[in-house]
Amino acid sequence: MTDGTVFVATCDLAAQVRGRAAPAARLPQTLRGGVGWVPANLALNCFGDLADGHLFGSVGDLRLVPDADTAIDVPADGSTPGLRLYLADQTRLDGSRWPGCPRSALREALDLLRDTAGLEIHASFEHEFTLQGGGEQHDGPPFSLQRARAAEPFGTDLVALLEQTGLEPETWLPEYGSGQFEVTLRPAPGLVAADRAVLLRELVRDLARRRGHRATFAPILDPASVGNGVHVHFSLRRAGGAPAMYDPQAPGRLSDLAARFAAGILRHAPAVVAITAPSPASAIRLTPHRWSAGGAFLAERNREALLRIAPTVEIDGGDPAAQLHLEYRAADATANPWLVLAVLVRAGLAGLAQDEPARVWPEASTEADLAGEPALPASLPEALAALEADETARTWFPRELLHTFLTVRRSELDHVEGLAAADLCGKISDVY
Ligand code: GLU
Ligand code: MG
């Protein structure tokens, strides 16, 4: 590859993908030593402002070192040149880990999962987004062919692009909300799955722009309607790949190990939600009856659960052991995917170390049955305070990262202070 440029990117604490381009002719040098980066960039909030009270000054230098395995090639399209894109780790100048790097935080969590529990995690991030503009009406009925056709050629081009870039698309569908669509990808090893989530959002936005639309992944556009969720499907496997979540005799067919992992996520739910649903608008989506996540409980095939035991397909001898997995429903695309998976692994590991298996609510449970289950944090300030107050959760991330995360997210709260819910949703949608 000698033509054009390569872009080396990170995804930051505000889930913004930022980075630098280098000439393709210098690719070997770029792969070896990365491109320059600045510590204070970590303190940028989603509105592009440096958060007051952050830890970094005007000094210091880092490298964004591309991970060669993450390369994707977006083909040229009309007058838009093609793009080689790499995701990168943020390192010190000697290549050692920089504690503020979110991708390194996920690597560390995955290493801990392997070293302390002998487990690997496979995951897939399911994304919803809303397509706007383009002179077409995307408001055909929910789930309808009409709406899918109205979004053409975007939909077909998107599936082709995801296939070309190796993201392994599974389905593309018109969703329930006005102008809302969903895309699902095949499961992949944890780091690959989170990388794909970072890439998917950028590919969708980029293609939408080229086709004359705007795609927004904002958690909710209209406080009276449904939101755009990110559901994290995950399964635990023994080293070598054997499934570790399935026990046909257990409640929900969930193994003791999986139910204790789930218990950790439920016990730390307020802190976990602070990481996975971290915008000032996120909590509006996480309220009952929106099929997002209406409470901190584990249930069989229930779309109001924080943790849903997903169905298995047994047509034609399909093996349930290989399919049974959990779906964490309280994430959205204002969250950094590396941190989302890292926090689920950390909370799950805390559960393996300390907890009894979580109670599995059967599919037939009623709202009255579930009434005693804890609610999710009612607002971002509440979630951030819970994260700060959770002594275990505080150990999951280096101080540089956690302190900056809290500072960045609180600066976004300051930015939208006093806005009515509808205006707040609009403001967040302008960014995501
Ligand atoms: N839109 C829902 C959410 O905010 C998810 C609907 C579904 O796919 O189950 O998470
Ligand atoms: Mg959906």
Image: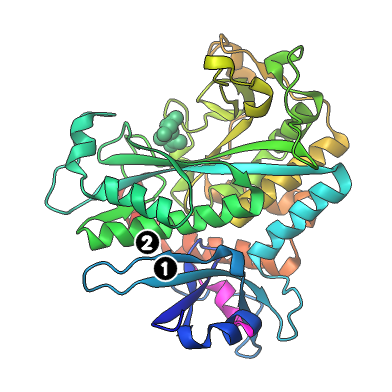
In which quadrant of the rendered view does residue 192 lie? bottom right
For residue 320, what is the image quadrant? top right
Q: Is residue 60 left or right of residue 303?
A: right
What percent of the width, then of the height, locates residue 71?
A: 52, 66
Q: Position of residue 259 (x, y in %)?
A: 75, 27
Q: Earlier in the sequence, mark 1 or mark 2?
A: 1
What residue would you read off at disc 1?
Answer: 47
Seen in the image, is 147 located left or right of residue 24? left
Location of mark 2 (residue)? 431
The reply to whether discs 1 and 2 touch (Cβ–Cβ < 8 Å) is yes
Q: Is residue 296 above or below residue 385?
A: above
Q: Residue at x 25, y 50 (%)?
A: 154
Q: Which residues are magenta?
A: 33-47
Q: Residue at x 70, y 17 (%)?
A: 253
Q: Amino acid at mark 2?
A: Val
Who's the residue at 63% across and 68% down the image? 404
Asked which secondary structure carries label 1, the reply is: loop
Considering only vertical position in the picture, is 343 above or below 247?
A: below
Q: Position of residue 124 (x, y in %)?
A: 56, 42
Mark 1 to mark 2 CA distance (whole Å): 7 Å
At label 2, counting other C-alpha atoms closer than 10 Å, the crowd grade (few under 14, some 14-19, many 20 or more) is some
